[in-house]
Amino acid sequence: MWYAGLDWADRHHDLVVIDETGRKVGQLRVEHTPKGLARLVSFLQDIAPLNQIACIVETTHGLLMRDLVGGRSRFVSSQS
């Protein structure tokens, strides 16, 4: 299992991924565009299948939620 924390902003988003031991395995900043969000999802998929990554996100809507939920990622929103 991996854990991803996503800082959601108006123009860009910052992502950090850690493994079960707490070791950082990756980080990424992407623009808030369909291309940037596709890059984020691809980055996560390069680490592990989306259903093995628990995502902590500050929102419950938008393109990213569609892409992550559609990919069966487990996510927790601070807005829910």
Image: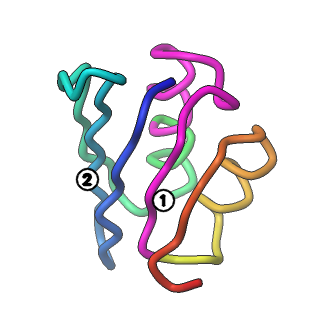
Kindly identify which residue carries mark 2. Answer: 14
Judging from the image, the colouring scheme is rainbow
Tell me if residue 24 comes above or below residue 37 in the rendering. Answer: above
From the viewer's perspective, tell me whether residue 50 is left or right of residue 54. Answer: right
Q: Nearer the viewer, residue 39 or 17?
A: 17
Residue type pointed to by label 2: Asp
Kindly identify which residue carries mark 1. Answer: 33
Q: How many numbered dots are placed on residues in this image?
A: 2
Q: In terms of image quadrants, where is residue 50?
A: top right
Q: Residue at x 41, y 37 (%)?
A: 3
Q: Nearer the viewer, residue 74 or 46?
A: 74
- Asked which secondary structure carries label 2, the reply is strand
Q: Position of residue 14 (x, y in %)?
A: 25, 53
First in sequence: mark 1 vs mark 2: 2
Tell me if residue 54 is in the magenta stretch.
yes
Return the residue found at the far front.
21
From the viewer's perspective, tell me whether residue 10 is left or right of residue 35. Answer: left
Q: In terms of image quadrants, where is residue 52?
A: top right
Q: Residue at x 46, y 39 (%)?
A: 40
Q: Which residues are magenta?
A: 40-58
Tell me if residue 60 comes above or below residue 29 in the rendering. Answer: below
Tell me if residue 20 comes above or below residue 60 in the rendering. Answer: above
- Asked which secondary structure carries label 1, the reply is loop
Q: Position of residue 32 (x, y in %)?
A: 41, 63
Q: Residue at x 52, y 71 (%)?
A: 77
Q: Position of residue 31 (x, y in %)?
A: 34, 56
Residue type pointed to by label 1: Thr
Q: Position of residue 75 (x, y in %)?
A: 59, 55
Name the front one of labels 1 and 2: 2
